[in-house]
Structures are given as C-alpha cells and as structure tokens.
Image (tube, grey):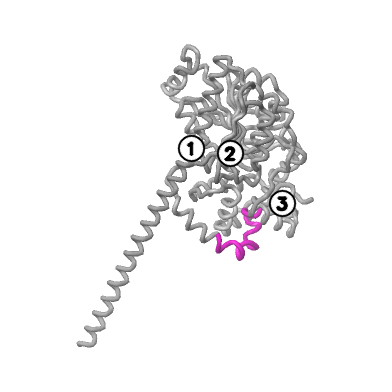
Amino acid sequence: MSAARRNPILGVVLGAAGVAAGVAAGVAADRAGRHRAALDALETTEQLEITPDEERVVITEDGVALHVEIDVPRPEAAAAAAQGLTSRDDPDRLPTVVFTHGYCLSLRSWVYQRRALKAAGYRVVSWDHRGHGQSGRGEPDSYVIDQLGQDLRAVIDDVAPEGHLVLAGHSMGGMTMLALGERYPNLIRERVSGAAFVSTSAGGLTLANGGRSATFGRLLLERVGPSVLGPLSDRPELVGRLRRIGRDVEEFLVEQNSFASPVPRKVVRHTADMLLSTPLDVINDYLVTFDGFDKRPALAEFQDTVTLVFNGREDVLTPPAHSELIVEGIPGAEHIVVNDAGHIIMLEHADLLSAHLLELIERGTRAREEHIPVSRGPRVRRIVTDVAKNRRQARMEREADEIVRAERVRALARLSRAKDAALAREQARRGS
C-alpha cells in the first residue's frame, strides 16, 4: 500500500506543492480560476501573524529543540477574568492554556484563538511539533504520537510547571493529548481542568477518509510513485519553483480539502504555507504513527476533566464519527458539531471556536474551584451553525456585488464616452 493511500494528506500536500502542477493544470486551472474570484470577494486586511510576548526553546529528552511561544495577558484583563471565577479573585489561579497543533501545520494555526484568549485574560502557550514549524527535527523513528506526548510533557514542565491547565489539540494535537494522558495520567487528574479535542480522533476508525483533492493527490501519487519523495526532499528549491508556477491550483486544492465554507484568500494562503512548509520526508516519516492508531483507553483519564469535543460536519479527514467515539469514552463531554465546517475549523470558524474555548475554560475553572463532579454530568451534543460568519459573508458578498455593479456602470460610461469621442472625430474629419 502506498504512503499516499495510507494518508491522503500526503497526497494533498504533494499535489499542492507542485508535483501535481503540470498534471493538474489542464484539469483544475479553470476551476481554480473561477474559485479565485469567489475568494477575492471575502478578502480581508486582517493580519494572520502574532508576535508572542515570550519565545522559548525546550529541549526534549532526545535532544530535539522545540519552539514554544507564550502570550501573556495584561494584568487588568487577568484580574477581570479571575473576578468571581477563582477563590479570592486571584489571577494566579487561572489556568494556562496549552495549544497543540495538527499534522503538517504549526502553532500559527491557532492565531485567532491565541488573540481571543489572551485578550480575555489567560496565559497561552503554543508549540511546534518536532519537524514542524520552527522546531528542530528528530530521528525518523521518533515521529510517532507517543513521542509527541512526551514532548508535550516537556513543554508543560518547562513553561507551565505549576497551576491548572487547559489543553486544546487539533487533529494530531488531540492525539498527542491522549498520548500524554496515557503516559502521565496523574498529570491529567491533578492539573488539567479542561480539555478540547478539535477535529481529532482517538482511533478505532480509518483516519483521513479522503475528499476531492485528497483523492486526486492519492491517485496521482499512485501513478507517479512514492519515489518522488526522495528527489523532492533533496530539492527544496524545485518545490518552491513549482509552487510559484502552480499557486492558483495549490490554493484551490488546499481550500477544497481544508474548508467547507468560503474563507478569505489570506486564510487559504496561510494554511497552504503551513502545510507546504513541512519537509516532505517529515510528512512521510510521520505516516507510520497513524497506522493502527488507537488511544481510546486513554480517554478514561479525562473522565474528571471538563471536556469539549469540537468538529466540522463536513470534515473529510477526521469525520464526525471520530468525535462520537471520543464522546462515548468521556462521560459528560460536550460535543459541538458545526455545519459548513471542514478540518481546519480553527481558521474557518475562528470566533465560534474561541467562544466555546472561553466557555470551556470558565466551566473547567469553576468545577475545580467548587469541586463539582464532572463525570456525573450529562453528555451534550449540539449541531450549530456559525450565524455570525454567515452574516458577515452575506454582507461582504453584497458589498462585492455592489462594487462589481458600480464598476460595470463606470465601464459602460467610459465606453459611451469613447464612442461619442470617436463619432465626434469622425464628424470633424468629414467636415474638413
């Protein structure tokens, strides 16, 4: 079985990186061009980068340097968050939030949530997996979920050695949380007041079921062979050139596989840059960790933790069935299924996820402060629609339509003036 068939993310990344550029151009370029116009209507000037208050390097037990960023809230914001929520309204009793990103992404994927939680008064820690983002690379056999769980423990011990924690993990990040719980159950029971499993899986089902671009990438790799990995890994400048040539196709493929509703072009570009900045050999070496992945027994370690399970209804990589298994394993977990949402849900429905994370933090903190038994709570499952985003999208589309209509009127006026000028010149020529 080929590497791409085992995980279509690899096919997506390779296809978008330019391996598919020549083959896909004739098939997808026209659709990509039309799709580009739709993205243009939603474009935003908002910045998708964030400057952390602190940066650290955490060295793992096997010598890998992990890049960690820390966002520190203003004292007045932390004081406001603690008021009525902690004993003696003490900001020092607020939890530290630790974000763990997904496969082929980086800590940049949490930009919206980091801003929202910092503004709300919480200290936020984000880190890059080994081989991802700005973290160092490990040995090929170290790219496994169990090692990531130990890496997460190293990050916690270094930057949040005391106090309560809220853990949030997307995709492979959620799997990493389960590996942490399996290896260090006392840490979960004693310190973790809240846990968010975002578009992730505990195992027991086939990962990465596919999708249009995933299927395309997988089929392409089966034709050209996984042997492309070696040459491309040794020729990063070639990948860069191919990416520039096939940027429209790249954006189309990434957008189609990552999102289920329109998002600004800047968000698509942000996502593509993360996906395609991950070294191809690292992508390939991680594949083995998904074969037979099953951490369902580790869910029991979170039974006394306030838990949020958050996923998109149209997620083609970790469909809702994966989240259902997590909810079954954690009594009292709240399950939110978002309509019109794909796998990269923290960028697609950013405000909605941020709001639910803030609610999770508050519920978890209150449960710890007031000794509320969490596991006895009823399971809650809600299917929601991001009404606020839909309204913004409709408004922006109306504004875009008005701009198009105004431009059409101006163009017709220019054409009319040009015709009148040409007629006047012709009449003057005949009169002379």
Quarter of the view holding residue 322: top right
Q: What is the span of residues highlighted in magenta in the rendered image?
A: 14-31
* Classed neighbour count for the residue bearing mark 3: other residues with Cα under 10 Å, few (<14), some (14–19), many (≥20): some
Mark closest to the chain's N terminus, 2 or 3: 3
Q: Nearer the viewer, residue 140 or 213?
A: 213
| C-alpha distance separating marks 3 and 1 | 37 Å
In the rendered structure, which amino acid carries the disc numbered 1? Asp
Direction from residue 107 to residue 84 in the image, left or right: left
Residue nearest the viewer, comparing 405 with 160: 405
Residue 393 falls inside the magenta stretch? no
Where residue 273 sits: x, y (%)? 57, 47
Please tell me which residue is depicted at 36% across the width and 64% down the height of the picture.
Answer: 408
Marks 2/3: CA–CA distance = 36 Å
Disc 2 to disc 3: CB gap under 8 Å: no
In this picture, residue 422 sits left or right of residue 379: left
Secondary structure mainly formed by the magenta segment: helix
Provide the residue designation for mark 3: 229
Kindly identify the residue that appears in the image at 56 percent across and 28 percent down.
125
Front-most of residues 77 and 56: 77
Per the image, the residue denoted by label 1 is 351
